[in-house]
């Protein structure tokens, strides 16, 4: 059972919450980066999450038509086949989807999974993300209610982002300012609108100074201790201890201490994209620079086929990314926690 069933995905998240670890959620854009993520999880003996953003899905759909749903479905179907060869369990997830892309991405994917469930099958994806951080909180949560109901019908978990993550990802941009911190009032309003499990399970991407993209430690002020305040504020009102399953976005460059604090306060999923992109590309660059006269037809020569064969440098790219995924498992304490 390499692709988690709805029941197993819930078990994975429950185990992470109870054990104070989190699953790396690795963005992929190709069959090769998918294999790199699976390999990294397997080598760390960790279960994990594979995710596809709108831009990644568009890329996967091919540059002729650039269809996001085609790209996402194709890779998900591929994952259901090849993941069977890895001795770990993974969940499939779609990353950031803003309002203007819902009709071309998340809503059709929810319909596909609902149709599968109606035929007695498991959903194609195990969770989808609604990124309403560019909307007012009222509009964000209203759409979240609609999507949560559809997700429940398809046995899918919804992820919601209620306040902005700074930086840029797939064309969604937020300034780096004081709005990057979710308040207790924001969390209470979320609980009022989406419930605390009785309306369906959801993951919450709260903001504590997170920024997408490349930055060095110290350049962004992260306050993961804020998550404890959000948990406590909602717990006090509703009487449910540690009510939220949090997601850590924009984690590139985070310190070990910041990650540890986030885990202690309910983070069960942490997204990785920037760091794994670099880990995949860096070995390719090294290969090209070291073998430029082989990969190019220099001075009228024919080059060296074994040097420009994509399998040659592709294997190095896969290994580099897999190592970074395994490192993420160690940082998030998921190493050795795979389901038996």
Image (cartoon, rainbow, N blue to C red):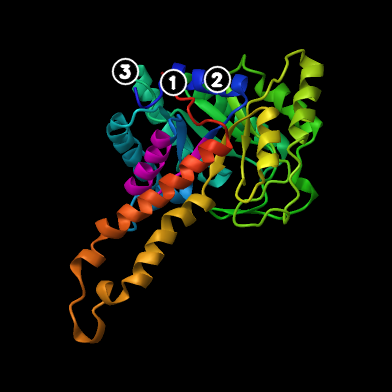
Q: Which residue is mark 3?
A: 119
Contact between marks 3 and 1 (CB within 8 A): the answer is no
Q: Which residue is mark 1?
A: 339
Q: Residues within 10 Å of mark 2 (few under 14, many from 20)?
A: some
Contact between marks 2 and 1 (CB within 8 A): the answer is yes
What residue sits 65% from the left and 47% below the top? 254
The dot on residue 15 is: 2
Tell me the magenta residue range: 24-43
Q: Could you say whether the residue bearing mark 1 is in a helix, strand or loop?
A: loop
- Does the segment drawn in magenta span residue 33? yes
The dot on residue 70 is: none
Q: Could you say whether the residue bearing mark 2 is in a helix, strand or loop?
A: helix
Q: Quadrant of the C terminus?
A: top left
What residue sits 34% from the left and 58% below the top? 63
Q: Is residue 184 left or right of residue 30?
A: right
- Does the segment drawn in magenta span residue 6? no
Q: CA distance from mark 3 to mark 1?
A: 27 Å
Q: Is residue 143 left or right of residue 66?
A: right
């Amino acid at each position: 059972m390499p692709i988690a069933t709805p029941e197993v995905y819930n078990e994975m998240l429950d185990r992470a919450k109870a054990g104070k670890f989190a699953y790396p959620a690795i963005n992929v854009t190709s069959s090769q980066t998918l294999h790199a993520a699976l390999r990294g999880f397997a080598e760390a003996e960790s279960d994990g999450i594979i995710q596809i953003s709108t831009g990644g899905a568009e890329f996967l759909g091919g540059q002729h038509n650039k269809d996001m749903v085609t790209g996402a479905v194709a890779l998900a179907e591929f994952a259901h086949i090849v993941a069977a060869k890895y001795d770990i369990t993974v969940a499939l997830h779609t990353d950031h989807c803003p309002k203007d892309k819902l009709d071309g991405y998340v809503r059709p994917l929810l319909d596909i999974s609902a149709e599968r469930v109606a035929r007695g099958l498991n959903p194609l994806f195990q969770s989808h993300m609604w990124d309403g951080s560019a909307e007012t909180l009222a509009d964000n949560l209203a759409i979240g209610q609609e999507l949560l109901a559809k997700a429940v019908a398809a046995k899918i978990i919804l992820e919601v982002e209620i306040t902005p993550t700074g930086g840029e990802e797939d064309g969604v941009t937020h300034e780096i300012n004081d709005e990057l911190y979710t308040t207790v009032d924001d969390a209470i309003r979320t609980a009022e609108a989406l419930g605390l499990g009785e309306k369906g399970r959801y993951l919450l991407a709260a903001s504590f100074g997170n920024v997408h993209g490349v930055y060095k430690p110290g350049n962004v002020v992260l306050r993961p201790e804020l998550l404890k305040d959000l948990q406590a504020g909602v717990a006090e009102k509703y009487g449910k201890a540690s009510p939220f399953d949090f997601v850590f976005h924009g984690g590139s460059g985070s310190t070990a201490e910041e990650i540890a604090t986030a885990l202690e306060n309910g983070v069960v999923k942490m997204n990785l994209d920037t760091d794994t992109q670099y880990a995949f590309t860096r070995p390719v660059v090294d290969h090209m620079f070291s073998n430029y006269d082989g990969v190019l037809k220099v001075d009228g020569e024919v080059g060296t086929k074994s040097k420009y064969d994509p399998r040659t440098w592709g294997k190095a790219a896969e290994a580099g990314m897999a190592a970074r995924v395994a490192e993420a498992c160690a940082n998030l304490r998921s190493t050795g926690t795979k389901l038996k």
